Image (cartoon, rainbow, N blue to C red):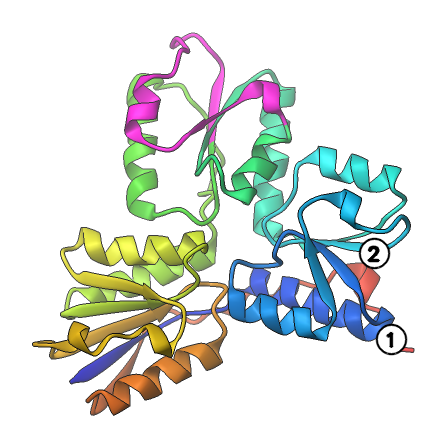
Amino acid sequence: MKLLLSKPRGFCAGVERAIDTVKRALELWGAPIYVKHEIVHNKHVVEELKQKGAIFIEDLADVPVGARLIYSAHGIPPWVREEARKRKLIEIDATCGLVTKVHSAAKRFADKGYHVILIGHKKHVETIGTAGEAPESTTIVETVEDVKKLPFGREHKLAYLTQTTLSLDDVKDIAEALLHRYPKIETLPSSSICYATTNRQMALREIAKDADLVLVVGDPRSSNSNRLREVAEKRGVKAFLINGEGEIRPEWLDGVAVIAMTAGASTPEPVVQQCIERLRRLGVTAIEEVVYTEEDVFFQLPKQVLGSVP
């Protein structure tokens, strides 16, 4: 069996920044450091940070008055900041810069009198945060069917944005449906889908066509990891989302000559390497890394954690 290893894969700049923010805060001020929501959607990352002293919370009432609070990479709605200030919390924002860009656009469109159509998953924390910028002027759509049910006429001022971690395939279909119904609908000059989501999906497309099986290493709660699995499935390739080597089932490899592997943007590379070693033990004899593009994006850490360790 041959293994085609997709690159880029795994951590993106926004994820690295968020994780490093928590680690840096723990170095500077010691445990505990409170984090609103899981810093990224990956159990391996979260467990490691918990062991170092991070406490992940959903309700700000669980954070002592005056404590430090880090916002996760996914972003938060404005009311969370208001509540944090009432509790005199010291806020450290690890929101990905590309998510912040979408938040700013949502607010800007709403302030100009547009109704924002947000393409995203209603229950995903990123979508909740973006919609929170202008809740009275935002409607979330998940499917082409949702677009057909929108109550607006062609005369309405409309703009659309997307969750940053969606499938390029799905967004294309939904955006086309929006443009068909509302030819004058506006959007950002460049896609709201982030560079890392785009690169990982495009890289997987390149190798999935040559594979009998696709394995995506990622957490089941990770939106971009699930979308990677769907990229393969939509191209007729059997695909599984795995969160570690122990989830690889030998029977999946029956009759398989070529395996393609990638990893979601919140998946640590050591977990990928453990999966590769498991595949070696199961019969993989050749490994080829297929490079779609090189990534050199870097996001500066929040200013609060740039000081020197005492």
Describe the element under mark 2 as helix, strand or loop. strand
33 or 113, nearer to the observer: 33
Query: What residue is drawn where x is 57% and y is 31%?
Result: 131
- Looking at the rendered structure, the kind of residue marked 1 is Ser
Q: 159 left or right of 263?
A: right
User: Label 1: which residue?
Assistant: 308
Above or below: residue 211 compared with residue 79: below
Q: Residue furthest left?
A: 255
Which mark is on residue 68? Answer: 2
Instruction: Mark 1 vs mark 2: give the one in front.
Output: 2
Query: What residue is drawn where x is 83% and y is 72%?
Result: 30
Above or below: residue 152 compared with residue 237: above
Q: 139 left or right of 204?
A: right
- Looking at the rendered structure, the kind of residue marked 2 is Arg
Q: Quadrant of residue 290?
A: bottom left
Q: 243 left or right of 289?
A: right
State which quarter of the image contains the N terminus: bottom left
Describe the element under mark 1 as helix, strand or loop. loop
Q: Quadrant of residue 21?
A: bottom right
Picture coordinates of residue 74 (x, y %)?
58, 49
Q: Residues within 10 Å of mark 2 (few under 14, many from 20)?
A: some
State which quarter of the image contains the C terminus: bottom right
Picture coordinates of residue 216 (x, y %)?
33, 66
Q: 158 left or right of 213?
A: right
Q: Residues within 10 Å of mark 1 (few under 14, many from 20)?
A: few
Instruction: Verify whether residue 128 appears in magenta.
Output: no
**Which stretch did the figure color magenta?**
134-160
Instruction: Verify whether residue 146 appears in magenta.
Output: yes
Picture coordinates of residue 246 (x, y %)?
36, 77
Q: How many marks?
A: 2
